[in-house]
Image: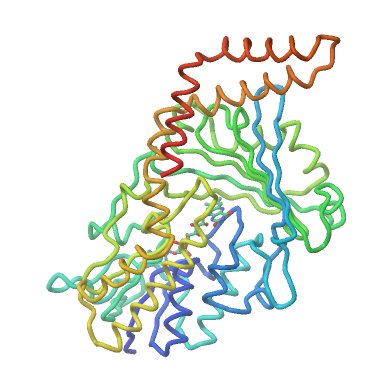
Amino acid sequence: MNFDVIIIGAGAAGNAAAITLAKGGAKVLQIERGKFPGEKNLMGGIIYSSSLEEIVPDFWKNAPIERPITEQNYWVSDKQSVTKLGYSDDAFKAKTEAPAHAYTVLRSEFDKWMAGEAKKHGAMFLPATVVLDLIVEDGKVVGVVTDRPNGEIRAPLVISGEGVNAFVSWKRNFGSKPKPDEVALVVKEVIELPEDVIEDRFQISGNEGASYEIFGDITKGCLGYAFLYTNRKTVSIGVGSLVADFANNEIASYELLEHVKNHKSIKPFLKGGKTIEYAGHLIPEGGYKKLPTLVADGFLMTGDAALMVNAVHREGSNFAFVSGRLAGEVALEAIKNKDFSSGFLNAYRKKLEDSFILKDLKSYEDVFPFFRKRRDILNDYPQLISYAAKSLLTVDGTPKGKKKKNMVKGVLKMKNPAQIVKDLYNLLKVLGK
Ligand SMILES: Cc1cc2nc3c(=O)[nH]c(=O)nc-3n(C[C@H](O)[C@H](O)[C@H](O)COP(=O)(O)OP(=O)(O)OC[C@H]3O[C@@H](n4cnc5c(N)ncnc54)[C@H](O)[C@@H]3O)c2cc1C
């Protein structure tokens, strides 16, 4: 068969590109190594409606979504205490004929549904097939080599939606294998609990859901955070950190997850639950400075393969949906103009530059390098916050004036004031870009 475009992968980015192209009438082949879409995929995971609505406008009516996220909590832990900050807003809820702001999903079901949308519009789907290499002739990508017998398949354009392990792209020097401090390992369990127990424990109703992200001592000195998200009849609990930090701290990922599950603030949420899924996956964190070639003759890169993730804000799915859609839109133009040169396809990069994708990646380019150098911040400051809260909240007959003075003195003993000012300044500088 003749194809206009071959897409590697049926994850968030590959599916977004496949739907866009199939809806536009292109002859698309999507190749996925899993036996079904989502078999190999994993996320926390929260998806954002705005980015998916642009691809499947009424998605929330049919997609296998779990719960809308209407309450977001951020906790900071030290050895004995937890400081909690939460935000809930009716604006996050679904309205008549409008989806909620964000939803939890389970990828094995969700990816199947999304790839089904592409199939519905005419995309051809080839499961259980690994793309081994790109076919490159005269400097142009003109197809792929798969692990099937006589496995070459040709098309004038190939879109990589390979995800974090972009071996096919790396083979042709489109990007390269990340270093251990440029990639995070996340381990996650899905724990089954009765729906009413979830709603009681998390104090949510049927159309509400909550997310918890926990920083500080809970990661035992590893740069990262733990998370707990409500699904309908399950909760997702996980923890992630740079691969280098697991190695440097000599902690196995499953040990860290056990530590998180047994943390006194988390354990009551999980009591009596049954683990029905356990998995690990990588998140690329090289950021803007490590961005690979996004465009070449006959070739586009999307999603995690192109390092499009903002881990600070727990965003990756939306980067994948939007980059996949933009790649699909540019590919439709290329098919119309019969021009698959990098000059023409560069419109993809321009669209990424005009969207939040490259703007956000650029503005966060110094955040990870900063935290990599200053891992201590995530340990020292939770202790300061805890000390300050404990000093002020303990009622022991000490007059408040003296209490406040003691609190300030204690904090300044723990950390040099000049260092606090410097840290704050540097943090605001990298985050405020
Ligand atoms: C534990 C975890 C929690 C996360 N939580 C969130 C969250 O809450 N919110 C959020 O927005 N983001 C989250 N993310 C990030 C988000 O999941 C990713 O950014 C997003 O899935 C990237 O989509 P993708 O299509 O680029 O890659 P993937 O979804 O990984 O898809 C890649 C696909 O390509 C296939 N493939 C790869 N190589 C080949 C090959 N050679 N041949 C054939 N098929 C191939 C794979 O099997 C896979 O199906 C999380 C990530 C992880 C790991």
Colour mapping = rainbow
Q: Percent x, y for residue 51?
A: 53, 68
Determine whether 369 is above or below 118 in the image.
above
Farthest residue in the front direction?
Answer: 401
* Residue occupying image coordinates x 64% and y 63%: 101
Nearest the viewer among 106 and 427 is: 427
Q: Position of residue 354 (x, y in %)?
A: 37, 65
Number of marks drawn: 0
| Vertical placement of residue 402 versus 200, above or below | above
Task: Name the quadrant of the N terminus.
Answer: bottom left
Q: Residue 75's spot in the image, x, y percent? A: 67, 36
Residue 433 vertical position relative to residue 52 in the rendered view, above or below: above
**Relative to 432, is 131 on the left or the right?**
left
Farthest residue to the left: give it: 138
Quarter of the view holding residue 425: top left
Asked if residue 417 lies left or right of residue 67, the reply is left
- Res. 160 image quadrant: bottom left
Residue 317: image x %, image y %? 52, 60
- The quadrant the C terminus occupies is top left
* Residue closer to the observer: 370 or 328: 370
- Residue at 48% from the left image edge and 23% from the top image edge: 421
